Amino acid sequence: MEETEALLQFDRVSVVFGKAGGSEGLQALTDISINVSDGEFVCLLGPSGCGKSTLLNLVAGFLFPTEGRVTLNGEDVKQPGPDRGMVFQEPTLYNWLNVFDNIAFGLRMRGVAKAEIKERVSRFMELTGLKGFEQYPPYELSGGMKQRVALSRVLVSDPKVLLMDEPFSALDPATRQEMQNLLEALQNRRKCTILLVTHDINEALYLADRILVFSARPGHIIDEIDLRGISFTDRRSEIIERPDMTALHKRIMDAVTQHA
Amino acid sequence: MSEKRERFIRICITAATILCVFVLWFLATSLGWVNTRLVPSPGAVWNAFIEILTGGYKNNTLLAHLGASLGRLLIAFCGATLLGVPLGMLSGFHPRLGAVFEPLVEFFRPLPPLAYYVLLVLWLGLGNESKIVLLLFACLPPIFVACAAATKRVPADYKNSARALGASQRQLFLHIVFFYCLPDTLTGMRTAFGVGYTTLVSAEMVAALSGIGWMVLDAQRNMRNDVIFVGIFIMGLTGILIDFLLRRVEKRLVPWAGKA
């Protein structure tokens, strides 16, 4: 078993909530084993409440497995840290700070030098198309722009792993597509390991190197689709047109509905 | 356009309501529906107002009375804010600290101030101290409760986002929780000012020689119903004015309140 090159490992992970004394508790995840290699884009698909978000929270260090281990670079995840950035469904921007200060927040908290903060934040604002919005208060931005700020705020810390919990599901279709393109462009520039939770099958097919399909609670992996061997010329349009892609779409759909 | 018109109409209705009250009051006193020794006429109240404004009331000018009251209230209000905001927020943030302070405040909150005022006078003397402490006890619970409740309502995603960006518990409290709770805190402060204001008369019942509340009480003893009316009008109008000013401050300080 030569699995040591995995950056992120789930080793027989189970999570039970509210298990106290004699009570059974709520089983959120059972017996999950995943290896994610460096630079891989993994999409987690499944019905609502299947524990996909729980899985991200384990990597982020917001909660810990009841059984099993979650390791990053071979070490147990013990607490949150800027090497693992999280983007939530709600942008959770800090309304009392302007856009620039929102993106600079993490760097400031960790005492990065002023000049470096300015340089890094400006660079990311450029990359994410936020240039010119430095002084804007977040609450005046559109949903898509807010999510750009949330993404920049995390990426500016140069995380090893990017965790995204249905980040585009609250956006309108056009903006969602725009954000997917942006994410893809960023990923092509600088390989980041990404775990993205979604219930949009096309989004997963478009973005992922690998798709993990989850069952309803207690969540476990019921299907795994590796897209790395498939070559595309124009992935977005081919997802709708190519027969092998429509077959994959159907396979995922069937898996999700059967286990719902 | 129609919204502006609607606003204008509502202002007219309010103005007409106030006018009606005055007309009714005028008719009731001038046509002899009520005994003018019990209900002074608008003219008599106006004359009393001019008399107090020019000649003062019992060795103090009207402004001195008002200033004495507002001075006490302001000191108490500032003290309550300085105590209530940090205690309330820390109690909400650290449930174990909340276990210390919440029961104490819950016990104090429903007590009528007059129930313990005499004790305060016995302990702190007849001077300003006992009055200020009474007002402080009146102002503190609304601020504390608003802060504690707001702190508990900070969404987990907000706290997690900051932790994932590298904020320590201390930074999380000072840079995220404090600001997130600021709108509710200011609302609590406004409520506290209102509660303090209604306690003003009680606070000036014992051994006071100045203050707008004392003026009303003294006028009661001397059957100067016109002066009572003047005092009530002044208290009502300054109350509205102060609330208006606090609302303005609120808008300036937390322009994001109520916005996602």
Image (cartoon, coloured by chain):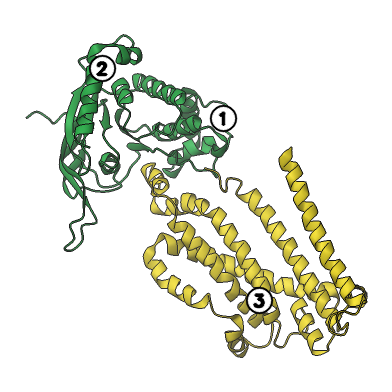
Colour displayed for chain B in the image of the structure = yellow
In the picture provided, is A94 more to the left or to the right than B135? left
Label 3 and label 1: CA atoms lie apart by 48 Å
Q: Nearer the viewer, residue A107 or B248?
A: B248
In the picture provided, is B11 more to the left or to the right than A241? right
Residue A133, labelled with which disc? 1
Q: Residue at x 39, y 45 (%)?
A: B157
In the picture provided, is B164 more to the left or to the right than B4? left
Chain under callout 1:
A
* x and y, in percent, of residue B128 in the image: 69, 81
SS at badge 2: helix
Residue A231 visible? The answer is no
Residue lying farthest to the top in this orientation: A233
SS at badge 3: helix
Q: Residue at x 44, y 55 (%)?
A: B153
| Quadrant of the frame with the N terminus of chain A | top left
Q: Nearer the viewer, residue A150 or B221?
A: B221
Q: Residue at x 83, y 88 (%)?
A: B223
Q: Residues within 10 Å of mark 1 (few under 14, many from 20)?
A: some
Q: Amino acid at mark 1?
A: Phe
Q: Nearer the viewer, residue B76 or A91?
A: A91
The quadrant holding residue B226 is: bottom right
Residue B225, labelled with which disc? none
Tell me if residue A192 comes above or below residue A103 in the rendering: above
Badge nearest the viewer, 3 or 1: 3
Which residue in the protein does label 2 denote? A246
Residue B199, labelled with which disc? 3
Badge nearest the viewer, 2 or 1: 2
Chain under callout 3:
B
The quadrant holding residue A96 is: top right
Q: Amino acid at mark 2?
A: Thr
